[in-house]
Structures are given as C-alpha cells and as structure tokens.
Image (tube, rainbow, N blue to C red):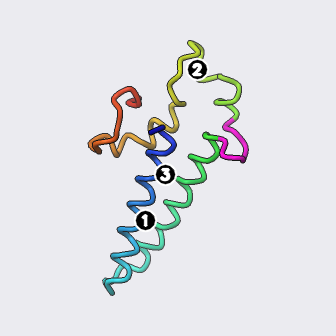
Amino acid sequence: MTLTEFLLARIAEDESDVWSFRDSGESGYWTWQRMLAEFQAKRRIVEEHAGGGGPLCEACADGLWNLERTSLPCPTLRLLALPYADHADYREEWRP
C-alpha cells in the first residue's frame, strides 16, 4: 500500500463515520459540514502531491524537498498521515 492509498483510505473511513453520525439524527450540523469540507481539502492535497492526472506539487515535481533523492514521499503527505500513526497499515518510514 502506498502512502497515497493509505491516506485516501483513511479519509474515506473518516468521511463514512461522519455520514453515519449525520444520518443518526444527531445535532452538530456545522460540525459535520466542516468535517466533510476538511475531507475534500485533504483529498485535494493528496491528489496535488500524488499527481493522479492532476498537477503535481511543485516541490515534489522539482525534488526541492528531497535533496537526498530518497524514495520517501514528500513531507506534506507524511504529515497528513501522522494522525493515523496508530493504524495497522501505517509504516514507520512515513513518520516525518
């Protein structure tokens, strides 16, 4: 599993949880609206860095962050993954 796949899967899980909360009739309209917007923003960040047919992150494309030319993903994606570090599929080499 790549870091991109990992992030998109975690975002999808979180989004599913929010929809379940919303559909349960619980209050908190603004909370789940904000969270859904956050998931969209995170997806766009991942896509921006991963390519996915869209534009690449300029720093990733130019290798500006990766002076050693290692195979690690860029720091932005690794930071997005950090809240999921306790997930079974998280890899320690992704830790920023």
Mark 2 packing: few (<14 Cα in 10 Å), some, or many (20+)?
Answer: some
Query: Which residue was labeled with disc 1?
Result: 15
| Residue drawn 44% across the image and 56% down it | 11
Q: Which residue, given by chain and number where applicable, does mark 3 sit on?
A: 8
Residue at (55, 61) in percent of width and height: 40
Q: Position of residue 81 (x, y in %)?
A: 41, 42
- Specify the amino acid type for callout 2: Asn
Structural crowding at the residue carrying mark 3, measured as other residues with C-alpha within 10 Å and reported as few (<14), some (14–19) or many (≥20): some
Residue at image point 48% right, 67% down: 36
Residue 74 occupies quadrant: top right
**N-terminal-most mark, 3 or 1:** 3
Range shown magenta: 51-57
Q: Which residue is mark 2?
A: 66
Instruction: Classify the position of the N terminus by image quarter.
Output: top left
Check the image and report above or below for 86 versus 39.
Answer: above
The nearer-to-camera label among 3 and 2 is 3
Quadrant where the C terminus is found in the figure: top left
How much space separates mark 3 and mark 2, taking CA atoms? 23 Å
> SS class of the residue under badge 1?
helix
Query: Seen from this angle, which residue lies furthest bottom?
Result: 25
Q: Amino acid at mark 3?
A: Leu
In the rendered image, residue 83, in percent from the top left (x then y), is placed at 35, 45
Mark 2, secondary structure of its residue: loop
Residue 28 placed where, x, y %?
36, 79
Q: Main secondary structure of the magenta part?
A: loop
Dot 3 falls on a residue whose secondary structure is helix
User: Looking at the picture, how far across and down is residue 72, in whole percent?
Assistant: 50, 25
Residue closest to the far front: 1
Is residue 94 one of those drawn in magenta? no
Which disc number belongs to residue 23?
A: none
